[in-house]
């Protein structure tokens, strides 16, 4: 029995370290997608293969520096704290010490993101239709308009779904323009696992799949036009050269 328990704990530790970890939602900043007290499972495996966060994903990331402010002290006793430390170590409970946040990725490296008062959030000039995930009655950014901001490579711009109750990238532009390094990202939240009656997957909203949203895609027409023009220019140049040779002869 002790050997089986040891193996089970070792497997749980490996899963928590490399595959999936549980996180608790401590605030209302992601309502109604996530509620305070929800437990989400975070995919930690994909980043090991070099994948970076994509637009529309809900991600957990370490505090980039000062986003959380002063951490509230827990009122639980020493026994409860000890149990939580053990369970969080093997991934069965969220850690009380880790300073992590959860937000939605709105823009990635190379994107230009902006939102003016009364208007929608725009990524590379394309307006996002956010009515399916932002908190009912919220505006996209009327409380804190921003941009345009060019997101550097290797960084992301994040926002909470409860826009009027989320101190996200908009409120931390004094530090790297509010962007977060992908190195700070723990992983993508994929499932609401608890409570049972709220079990659901966290999919990417369809608005992030609209054509032309990618900065690279927005450059494609001009790139294709250039590529198509090159053969024509070369052909015309050959004609002029042959004509000049014929005249000289």
Image (spheres, rainbow, N blue to C red):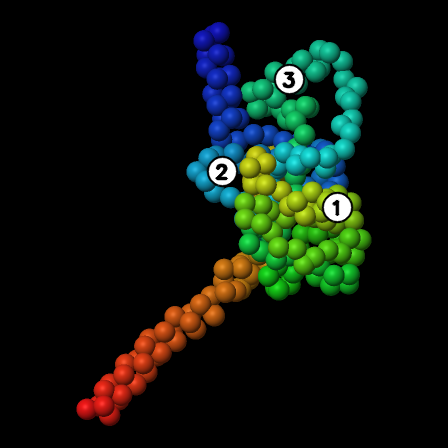
For image coordinates 64% across by 63% down, the residue present is 127
Q: Which numbered dot is residue 85?
A: 3
Q: How many marks?
A: 3
For image coordinates 57% across by 34% down, the residue present is 186
Q: Quadrant of residue 98?
A: top right
Which of pointers 1 and 3 indicates the residue nearer the eye? 1
Q: Which numbered dot is residue 171?
A: 1
| 164 w.r.t. 25: above or below | below
| 222 w.r.t. 136: above or below | below
Q: Position of residue 87 (x, y in %)?
A: 61, 19
Q: Secondary structure at mark 1?
A: helix
Q: Secondary structure at mark 3?
A: helix
Q: Which numbered dot is residue 47?
A: 2
Q: Position of residue 42 (x, y in %)?
A: 56, 35
Q: Secondary structure at mark 2?
A: helix
Can residue 195 be spotted in the picture? no
| 25 w.r.t. 129: above or below | above
Task: Looking at the image, tell me whether mark 1 or mark 2 is earlier in sequence order.
Answer: 2
From the image, which quarter does the C terminus lie in? bottom left
Which of pointers 3 and 2 indicates the residue nearer the eye? 2
For image coordinates 54% across by 48% down, the residue present is 153
Q: Are marks 1 and 2 in contact (CB under 8 Å)?
A: no
Dot 3, crowdedness within 10 Å: few (<14), some or many (≥20)?
some
Q: Foreground: 149 or 35?
A: 149
Label 3 and label 2: CA atoms lie apart by: 25 Å
Q: Foreground: 18 or 65?
A: 65
Which of pointers 1 and 2 indicates the residue nearer the eye? 1
Dot 1, crowdedness within 10 Å: few (<14), some or many (≥20)?
some
Label 1 and label 3: CA atoms lie apart by: 32 Å
């Amino acid at each position: 029995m002790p050997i089986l328990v040891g193996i089970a704990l070792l497997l749980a530790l490996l899963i928590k370290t490399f595959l999936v970890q549980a996180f608790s939602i401590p605030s209302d900043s992601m309502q109604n997608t996530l509620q305070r007290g929800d437990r989400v499972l975070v995919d930690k495996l994909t980043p090991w293969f070099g994948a970076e966060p994509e637009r529309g994903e809900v991600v957990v990331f370490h505090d980039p520096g000062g986003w959380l402010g002063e951490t509230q002290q827990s009122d639980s006793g020493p026994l409860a704290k000890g149990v939580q430390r053990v369970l969080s170590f093997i991934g069965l409970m969220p850690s009380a010490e880790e300073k992590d946040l959860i937000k939605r990725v709105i823009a990635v490296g190379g994107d230009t993101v902006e939102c003016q008062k009364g208007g929608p959030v725009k990524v590379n000039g394309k307006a996002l239709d956010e009515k399916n995930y932002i908190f009912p009655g919220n505006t996209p950014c009327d409380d804190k308009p921003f941009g345009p901001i060019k997101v550097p490579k290797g960084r992301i711009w994040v926002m909470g779904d409860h826009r009027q109750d989320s101190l996200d990238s908009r409120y931390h532009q004094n530090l790297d323009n509010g962007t977060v390094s992908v190195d700070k990202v723990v992983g993508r939240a994929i499932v609401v696992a608890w409570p049972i009656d709220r079990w659901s997957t966290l999919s990417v909203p369809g608005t992030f799949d609209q054509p032309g949203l990618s900065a690279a895609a927005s450059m494609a027409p001009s790139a294709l036009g250039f590529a198509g023009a090159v053969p024509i220019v070369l052909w015309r140049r050959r004609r002029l050269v042959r004509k000049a040779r014929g005249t000289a002869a």
